[in-house]
Amino acid sequence: MNNIIINKTLKLFKYVTYFLAAFYLSNVYADEGFINLTATEIIGYQQSPTVYVELEVNKTRDLHVVIQTVDGSNPINRTMKRIKQSGKYHFEVEIDDLKPGKYRVVSYLTPKGKNWSDRIDQATPFNFEVINKPEYIKQISFSNQDKINFVKWPKKIIGTQEANLVIQFEITEPRDLHIKLLDSDNWKEHGAFKLPVVEPGNMSLPLSNLKADFPIGNYAWVVFLAPTGENEPVSEKFGKHFTLTDKATK
């Protein structure tokens, strides 16, 4: 009878110990792991997939990447990258002559020198396709005019408020998207930059703490398209007015 009680007590102790260890490890690694994982969605059979990953780590970790068939039954290739700090990374996984079909990228994060059984986090698998051609070339449908369709931005920015500058545009060929910040009271230029765009679409630029770089006042974003490497507009300029203030008003 006493042996039965002792055995049950030992089993209970093992379960509690296992639970506490698992709880401890989950808390130790709580702020580490994957933020995002993607890859090239379509490639030819002579191309290699490019993997894009964003990670949060507290110390040096090992990033394991496995390319496998979409049902997970057949690993094609494995690679490991040593990650020393949080951030965004991208790299090619070299594979020779992938057969046309559907595949997926599986990735997990472990302590340095460890493997699957010691994983800290595992990413959601990302599927990609290999077409029956040596190389996949994306077909771009250009527009019949160069045009800024719209610019989205709040009418008022308060203090360190964060907001996204959203721009939708059409292009007839690769262009430079010019974005200028002007004082709308005297039209003095406070900042300007340009971004290359290679196909029609949307662009979202997260911006915050404008008050740290610009004085309180009235402003306007002025956006236009120009030939690559040039400054002369090929589209009409699109303006978006707003007020930068340090306090909320009713």
Image (cartoon, rainbow, N blue to C red):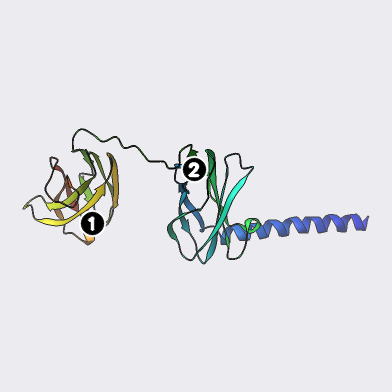
Amino acid type at circle 1 is Leu
Q: What residue would you read off at disc 1? A: 210
Direction from residue 37 to residue 191 in the image, left or right? left
Direction from residue 197 to residue 51 in the image, left or right? right
Which quadrant is home to the C terminus?
top left
Q: Nearer the viewer, mark 2 or mark 1?
A: 2
Residue at screen point 84% across, 54% down:
8
Direction from residue 13 to residue 218 in the image, left or right? left
Residue 200's spot in the image, x, y percent? 27, 39
Looking at the picture, tell me which residue is in the foreground, 52 or 15. Answer: 52
Instruction: Name the residue at the left extreme.
Output: 186
Question: For residue 99, what is the image quadrant?
Answer: top right
Q: Distance between the residues labelled 2 and 1?
A: 47 Å
Direction from residue 225 to residue 90 in the image, left or right? right
Q: What residue would you read off at disc 2? A: 45
Residue at screen point 46% across, 64% down:
85
Which quadrant is home to the N terminus?
bottom right
The vertical placement of 228 against 63, above or below, is above
Amino acid type at circle 2 is Tyr
Disc 1 secondary structure class: helix
Residue 248 appears in the figure: no
Instruction: Count all numbered tags in the image, as a single digit.
Output: 2
Disc 2 secondary structure class: loop
Residue at screen point 60% across, 57% down:
119
On residue 237, the disc is: none
